[in-house]
Image (cartoon, helix red, strand yellow):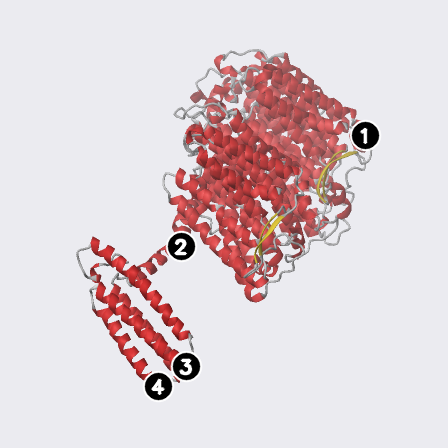
Amino acid sequence: MTVTALVLGPIVIGLLLYLVPRKQWRTATTVAAVIAALAFVLALADPHAPDASRHWLARPFDASFHVGFGPISYWIVLLLSLATFGGALVLTGPRSRDVAAQLLILQGAMNGVFLAKDLLLFALFWDLMLIPVFLVLIDAGPHARAAWKYLIYNLTGGLALLLATAAFGVVAGTTDVIGNPNTHVTIGETWGLWIFAGFAFAFLIKTPVFPFHTWMPDTYAELPAPVVAVVSSVQSKAGLYGFIVIALPFLAPEMARAQTLMMVLGSIALVYGALAALAERDAKRVVAYSSLSHLGLILLAIFSGSALAFQGAVVYIVAHGLFSAALFLVLGAVEQREETRDLARLGGLGARNPKLAGALMLAALAALGLPGLAGFSGEILILTGLFKAGFVWPALIALVAVVLASAYMLRLFQGIMNGPEVPDLPERRDITWTEGLAVAPLVIGFVLLGVNPGPVVALVSDASKTTVSSTGAPAAPIPETVRAAR
Amino acid sequence: MSVAPENYIALSAVLFFIGVVGVISRRNPLIMLMAVELLFNSANLALVAYARAWANNAGHIFAFLVITVAAAEAAIALAIVAVTFRRTPFVDVDEVSALKG
Amino acid sequence: MLLYFIWLLPLLGGVLLWAFGPQLKSWAGPIGSALIGVSFAATVVLWNDASAPGGLHVPLVTWLPGWSFGLQLDKLSLIWSLIITGVGFLIHVYSIGYMDGDKAFARFFAYMNFFVFAMMTLVLSDNVVGLLVGWGLVGLASYFLIGFWFEKPSAVAAARKAFVMNVVGDVGLMFAIFLLVQHIGSISYADIFTHFAVLASFSPHVTFLVCLGLFIGCAAKSAQIPLHTWLPDAMEGPTPVSALIHAATMVTAGVYLIARFAPLWSASPDAQQLVGVIGALTAIAGAILGCAQWDIKRILAYSTMSQIGYMIMGVGVGAYQSGVFHFLTHAFFKAQLFLAAGIVIHALANEQDVRRMGGLRTRMPFAFIAIGVGVLAISGVPGFSGFFSKDAVVYGALETGHPWLYAIGVITAGVTAYYMFRLLFLTFFGPYRGDVDPSDLGIRHPELAGIAPASAGRAASSGHHPEEEEPHRHAPSWLMSGPVAILIVPTIFIGFLDWGGANSPWGRFFDGFFPHASEAAAHAPAISEIVSTALVFVVVVIGFAIAFWRYGTTVAQRDAIARLRTESIRMPAVLVNAYYFDAAYEALLVRPARALGGWFDRFVDPHVIDAGVREAAWSAQWLGHLFRSFQTGLVRAYALTLALGVVCIVAYYAFAFTGGVR
């Protein structure tokens, strides 16, 4: 019941929000924030909620409307609620009613993606979650180019995903498999590689990973900050989540075969994103490229086959969600005040907006992996795991990216907040209490997760054990992590 | 006495050929429709002839089905023709090429 | 319990002062100072527990099996904790006077308290990841405080540089952690030290790599070559910050790290060799640069770099006790030097150029005495603290069989005496030159002179200091002179702790704590300790004599202006540009990275990757055009096609079922 409500509730209420007159956008945003908060409370109060399942198709393969919490999706649902809550709170202006409605629909659709236990359902929600973002984009941007780019890239991925899902269903006989430890689905060699390729293509585009990433900076730059906070914090994890819950348990041999390729792509994304972020002038695009870099790291972790890196990846997925949402929300506040995102034009805001500066500082620090905050705890686990599994070069490349991260994040922060005050920038008041309320839960989240990622790790790690004096097994192919994923 | 099925089939083929030539060569839509009717009926003739020859009633049933479809087709086609000619002054299908790619 | 208290109290202070700074106003300083004072008192209370074998230990959190975090207070961390909270307390009190009237007064104390928390995390952690957390947090605190006056572009740039270079160090530490976790599977010191010696997989090669990773961390944090360039720029921060972070505590974290990992270091002679050499090189290179500086804080910064070079050399070659002892004495005398310099700077309305000082002996007798004592201590004049510790370090190099390092150490002692007495003479003797036209003193426009950009913003710096409106000189308040006066006592006397070698209080305190350098006994030093002491003293006297000859004689003081002008103009470019390290990094790393990133962003993304996607779209469009031509719109053409199609199908079946034309 809880789980179904988490998926369908926001969608229904989001649609109903269109009944609110546009002038009363404040009502709409408040409702959206309350619903998001409610979703958070609901998930927090009932972590062991039973699955909801309704049989749906018998031919050509078994499929069900089956949703339920999994060890990773539970945290993502909490994260999504926080991000949506923050996004809805900071919405202002006459368009907010529509955006608030789309935010709720997006929340429901993404809850659907992460809670779906059926592959077909997963694929359907996968495409559904594109629609609200597309609508917001085409409404918000001065030119529709970014919107179409977003839609075309992601629909191409969605198509591959759907084909792979159908093939999976036909070969395995059922798609009701996600997170089900009792299914013994084996995909033979004939189809395995094709099915894996379809999934991987979709997931790589969605994450995104080099070289499928070019839609992302455009989308992130054009989307209004509240929406991009949600998209970057949660939607970008859909692909990685897919690798973890679909590819890892059912297509392990294919994953092992693709390991080298993915390691190379992940490493390229790591450095490419970091360097591009270092050169970019648009504040939101800096964060977009930093995401490319960070998500590349998670890809490395997932494909390394190391249990430690895998646990780190899950921590980092949540951590990245928290800090990227906070970053975009704060950047949105900056953009709203100064009407520009250009780092060359911005500067010196810190003197008059100390609280805004503090919020941006915290988010940037978490993003650059300051020890003690969430980015670090994920990073160190991933890197140690990578190294332990014998992937020395990717780990060393990641270390370079860590240094670059500190450079571009400080460049971002200092470019906006430090330096002499710029006289021709409008002078606005410091962070409002609603903005503070929107960012605070995210900040608290990444501080707590940074101090102790134990709870997140514990949920995914009962199977894997690291013992004193165990020597690193060289590149143990996936199985070690399979149990953790299921 | 009975006529050999070959004769029916030959007649059917002749009718079909006339119909095809009519559809392809004439520009007046009404004539074309009539040619289409010829096509239908040549097919009907063949169906009924085979049905009789092999004592299988499926052919008869198909013939009835075709007659029904032909009636429906004629009704719709005439409606389209009427609407089209209300818009254009020509009685020439080559001038009606709104579906050109 | 008390340990948690010591650790969290500064954090509490930092958060409170940050959140409620505007409300607390001028109370922020006393509150912040008091918290650190309480922390210090609590640390003193724990003395006995900490110096017991094994020390104190309390758990914190566990991430995973093998990843448990806790706090530990043993002899080594006790020494550091006492300095951090003790000297930290004095500097906090001093700051109440120094920062009085700054518009971000509360924020300053918030950062300072946060720094103490971070530094305590570093030294109290019982595991290497916790150490890394502290390592990163002190870097952050340092970033905050260097960039404290963040309207100043030079301060902002210096802060970022310090942070990024320190992240390079963090990355080195991470590398060491990877290896340790890979081979030992645990992050706690106890596990590491008990297991590494018996594990077969922990080969000498691995030990060396771990030490190398740790040393990259040390080099970045402790400003060792080649990661030292951030330290001089860090002088952009307020002077108390320079005293606390960039002299007494944070920059010596590298020394702590090596001393903490003494068992590993002792097991890897190669690493010892490397660290010893780098330490010695840094000592001499920093000292030489110190001779070429005009900014009083930059002179002290290079001297800090040089002195830490000594410490690193000491702990590197295995003379752990001496290295740590030099840390202790240096913390006192360098903090005192900085604070006293701060009094001078404060009184001269933020003038930091020694060429524009002079003759201050009579106007500021207290500052003169304070700096004088500090100079005597750092130069190693017998009886002062620096004498004991420096001698011990230098002789330690000889004892462990590194005569070349010993030689460098001795020479550096002479250079140190030279530039410190140069500072003393220029500042306090001769005529006052503050009212002389800068160009007469050879002070050119900083950009033209090619001085590092950090010093270029100096002129603008005063704009953000409360003194600008009131450029009159005034006597320091007791809040500022009090801490300096207190520091004079240990600056002179603390050295006697090490009087008498192994039987001294210091020797007994650390008896059995550090591994004995295995080869130490094998090398009988060529000269005895007393001869060595005499040798060092002679070199120091030579250094002093040169400084006196160039700046102290009556003639030199009379011609000071002309001489300074000549010296400024003739200063070798290689020294002015600090051996071109900054330029090299800029040309080899920063610019290429920027350029590559810009190329990715502005060329590869739109013109390579997107172009590929566009090609795909175009090919679809071309295919569409092709098919479009089939759609003529002529019904009769369609009918013909249809008929031909039917013919084809019929023909196919005719041939297929009849076996073709017979």
Q: Do callouts 1 and 2 mark residues in contact (Cβ within 8 Å)?
A: no
Circle 2 crowding by C-alpha within 10 Å: few under 14, some 14–19, many from 20: few
Extreme residue in the front direction? B1
Q: Nearer the viewer, mark 1 or mark 2?
A: 2
Circle 4 crowding by C-alpha within 10 Å: few under 14, some 14–19, many from 20: few
Circle 3 crowding by C-alpha within 10 Å: few under 14, some 14–19, many from 20: few
Whether callout 1 and callout 2 share a subunit is answered: yes
Kindly identify which chain the residue marked by label 2 belongs to: C
Q: Earlier in the sequence, mark 1 or mark 4?
A: 1
Residue located 58% across and 41% down the image = A5
- The Cα atoms of the two marked residues, 3 and 4, are separated by 26 Å
Q: Amino acid at mark 2?
A: Gly
Q: Earlier in the sequence, mark 1 or mark 2?
A: 1
In front of the other: C213 or A440: A440
In front of the other: A73 or C267: A73
- Name the spot of residue C615 as percent of width and height, x first: 37, 56
Residue named by callout 3:
B54
Residue named by callout 2:
C612
Mark on residue C49? 1
Q: Do callouts 3 and 1 mark residues in contact (Cβ within 8 Å)?
A: no
Residue named by callout 4:
C661
Q: Earlier in the sequence, mark 2 or mark 4?
A: 2
Above or below residue A238? Residue A101 is above
- The Cα atoms of the two marked residues, 1 and 4, are separated by 110 Å
